[in-house]
Image (cartoon, grey):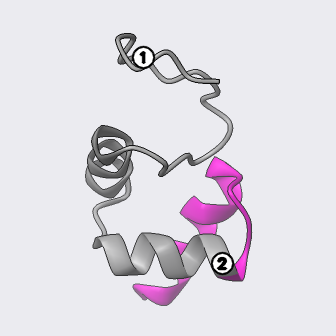
Amino acid sequence: MDNTKRKGLLDSSRVNIDEEWKVTYWTEEFKCSVIELETTILQVSTSVDEVKVYLEEIKK
């Protein structure tokens, strides 16, 4: 379980959106909206690499 007082990313290989600050981090990192991020995770996985590739593809 995540320590809510610790604001570092616990697993940098996975996109975790269970807390608002994590959603903010990932939407800024990928330059996408919350809806785009959520949709991408549902389409591919929570893998950072897979999310990045998918978002790059849909933004072409």
Report the residue marked by disc 2: 42
Does 48 sit above or below residue 32? above
Query: Three-letter amino acid code at disc 1?
Result: Gly
Q: Quadrant of the N terminus?
A: top right
Q: Earlier in the sequence, mark 2 or mark 1?
A: 1
User: How far apart are the alpha carbons under marks 2 and 1?
Assistant: 24 Å
Horizontal and vertical percent position of residue 17? 48, 51
Q: Position of residue 28 (x, y in %)?
A: 26, 51
Seen at 39% across and 43% down, the residue is: 19
Q: Secondary structure at mark 2?
A: helix
Which residue lies under the disc numbered 1? 8
Q: Work out whether 16 lies above or below 45.
A: above
User: Number of numbered discs present?
Assistant: 2
Amino acid carrying mark 2 in the image: Leu
Question: Relative to residue 47, is residue 2 depicted above or below?
Answer: above
Q: Is residue 52 left or right of residue 22?
A: right
Which residues make up the magenta segment? 43-60
Task: Indicate the position of residue 60 as horizontal and vertical percent values.
Answer: 43, 88
